[in-house]
Image (spheres, grey):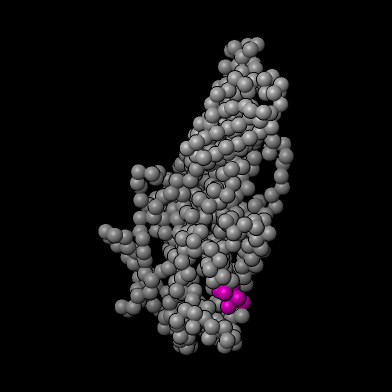
Amino acid sequence: MTYYERNQQFYRSFEKGNFAEAVEILEKDKKSPRKNSKLLYYLNLGTAAFMTGNYEKANLSFERAYEIGDNYSRNYFQEAASIILNPNVAPYRGEDFELLMIHYYKALSYLKTNDFEKALVECKRMNIKLLALGDKYKSEKYYRADAFVNVLMGIIYDASRDYNNAFIAYRNALNVFEEGYTEQFGVEVPEQLKVDLIRTAHLAGFPQERAQYEKQFEKIYEPIDREKGYLVFFWHNGLGPKKTEVSLDFVFTQRNGHIQFDNKNFRRHFDFNLSTDDYRSSGLSNLDVVRVVLPKYVERPAYFKEAFLEWEGQQKSLELGQNVNNLAFQSLKQRIGKELAESLLRTALKKAAEYQIRQENEGLGAAVGLFAQFTEQADTRAWQTIPHSIYYTRMALPEGEQHVDLVVKNAGSKDQHNFQFDIQARTTTFHFFHNMQVTYGRDTY
């Protein structure tokens, strides 16, 4: 069973919108914070609590997840066991984008309670992680920078009226977009980012930069109405991909001191050094085909395709800021070669051990074969309560009680959600909404 299937009761409640029940399921199950999946336990608990509006509980869970992810230390015994048995033996460390999204949820929780100071702390933590990613991956083909994280930092600095740092964060976001992020993850530069970049350049006292971006974007700075406040709205659309597993067959050969695994369909070829004597004595010479299992993401396409805010006949489109689905696929793609090599080696060694034991005891050899079969499993652990994608916009509104509608649409239908906000002049109000409806197609679960 995959991690999702083993925790199906929780996921079923969460996906139906029964968030309080989802929290209760996790807290009742004393085995939930399993040693090797503690990170995911707290991520799921934090997300479910966040959706109930219990931001204090959510942040306590997310802080625990942050501590686990940030203070992770290698256990070499478990690392070795994961290569011999399966990768689930080792603690789940989290994908790079998952560890960054902890701070997104924490920051949003603080913004909902108007605690800008703590939200700024999360900004600094995000920035530290981004710098570490830049050091960790040198190739631009890797996930080493995040445009939306910089946008979020800009929004928080902006709301705190720190326009200098807001401008820098917005400019960093634009640079990331222009340096390949759009092509890699399918997210265009939001028009809202362009507007905010020009506005904060003016407010920070950078006339040259303001003029530069006005010319580049063909937009003119619009003076701020000081009698109005801002509504920054985040729309979480759909659900991130499910993580499952797929099996592949590799042809096994030996040539000139090397054992080779080939799969023509997958276009993969692996070599391992091994002397002829070791090759024969190990039992590997009896292998023809090796079957391995690998982790695989399955997209859950979002049901709704677009959304806008509506206030007294005025409409403001929500723009794609983060494609979480694509981040997940890219993260797995970056390390699939390593996963495959370890799986091949692990499976071959298990098969060789089975053959050697069969020479002396057929029954015991069969038992070893069954053990090898049942212990071979891909790591299907993942944060599967996050949205498929995140949209956002900024809307200027008059001071006082304001009624705003969120309209979500797809090709054949639309839905509407009504909100009421107490807008304060020269102050930013934050809100989010999560539509979890997904499309179930031929290639989705």
Residue 334 sits inside the magenta stretch: no
When asked about the image quadrant of residue 174, the answer is bottom right
Magenta-colored span: 165-171
| Residue placed most toward the observer, 14 or 202 | 202
Q: Does 276 sit above or below residue 116?
A: above
Count of numbered circles in the view: 0
Name the chief secondary structure element in magenta: helix
Rendered location of residue 255, percent (x, y): 63, 28
Point out the residue furthest to the left here.
412
Residue at 62%, 70% in the rendered image: 120
* Extreme-front residue of the structure: 256
Residue at image point 55% right, 39% down: 268
Q: Nearer the viewer, residue 207 or 425?
A: 207
Q: Nearer the viewer, residue 389 or 175?
A: 175
Q: Is residue 101 left or right of residue 407?
A: right
**Residue 140: % across, % down:** 59, 59
Please determine whether, in this image, residue 99 is positioned above or below residue 392. above
Asked which quadrant contains residue 415, the reply is bottom left
Residue 428 is at least partly visible in this image: yes
Location of residue 413 in the rendering, given as x and y in whole percent from the top left corner: 27, 60
Query: Is residue 436 toward the left or the right of residue 128 in the image?
Result: left
Tell me: residue 417, above or below residue 2: below
The residue closer to the viewer here, 76 or 172, is: 172
Residue drawn 57% across the image and 86% down it? 208
Q: Is residue 52 visible?
A: no
Left/right of residue 314 with respect to residue 320 in the rendered view = left
Residue 6 percent location from the top left of the image:
50, 38
